[in-house]
Amino acid sequence: MKRNSNLYIFILFSLFILLVSNTININYLNKFKSKKTKKENNISSANLELSNLFFNSIKNNILSESNNLCNVNYYTKALNFIDYSSSILKQDEDIISLKKSINNKKSEYLSSNSNPSITTSASILNGISIATINSLSIESLTPYLIHVDIATQKTYIYEGSKNKWNLVKSFLCSTGIKGEDTPSGIYTIKERGNWFFSEKYNQGGRYWVQFFNDYLFHSTPYNKEQTQIVDSTLGTPSSHGCIRLSEEDSKWIYDNIPSGSKVIIK
């Protein structure tokens, strides 16, 4: 009986030790888990803060660069830059608001810069043709004059001077599609370059020559690697506002038409 009593006491003592041990282990694990959770929370908070800093940095750069482009009236370039750079910020209210503002500014700019030309030179814009070219007193700062006829999708190159213009080249072209029309007006040739690529439209052009803002003469569009023409259409409106030509014809303008030459589009 005493032996059984001792065994019983031993069992109770063992159970007590086991219970105490489990309690200590549970408390330790909870304490460890609490520390781990706290550490994980700190890491998550740090990651969130870094992520916010990263996104804010990207957004601030987009806002700054877009405003810089708008300050020199490159509104289409600004919109393309935003679309290319802000794929992860498409739903950001500031980005959406900025795009809306730039589109409004672009419309106002095109209106204010095209209408005076149309108003002051209505006789030229309404009357220009191969037959009337030397009866409209058209002048150019260079010996060259370009006329783009939107109705016939032709680009005419003249050489000479006021009322003494001679047609030297005629190119089939493609102007802007509906909604992205090539602006009518009287302009001058400005900058030029060998190649550009638009991330927005996923295509580029060779031998570009600027005549107004970010509107250009350039070749039919190529892919990014410049290995394949992505749209060979000429003779019907197919561009996003620029004037497309064959590569041979765009290179001719690039090589031969000096900056300052007058461009008439109607």
Image: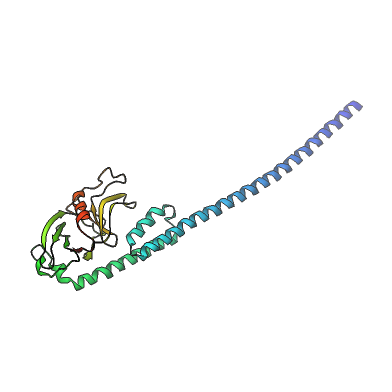
Please name the colour scheme applied to the rendered image.
rainbow
Dividing the image into 4 quarters, which one contains the N terminus?
top right
The one nearer the camera, 264 or 4, is 264
Residue 31 is at least partly visible in this image: yes
Measured from the top left, where is residue 123 in percent x and y? 14, 71
Residue 94 picture quarter: bottom left
Measured from the top left, where is residue 18 in percent x and y? 78, 35
Outermost left residue: 131
Horizontal side of 12 relative to 74 (left or right) equals right
The one nearer the camera, 32 or 216, is 216
Outermost bottom residue: 120
Measured from the top left, where is residue 259 in percent x and y? 24, 61
Dividing the image into 4 quarters, which one contains the C terminus?
bottom left
Relative to 125, is 235 above or below?
above
Horizontal side of 192 relative to 161 (left or right) equals right
Look at 56% across and 50% down and name the residue there.
Answer: 47
Measured from the top left, where is residue 235 in percent x and y? 16, 53
Look at 28% across and 66% down and name the residue there.
Answer: 110
Disc count in the image? Answer: 0
Residue 31 picture quarter: top right
Relative to 12, is 106 above or below?
below
Residue 133 picture quarter: bottom left
The one nearer the camera, 40 or 144, is 144
Residue 1 is at least partly visible in this image: no
Horizontal side of 231 relative to 79 (left or right) equals left
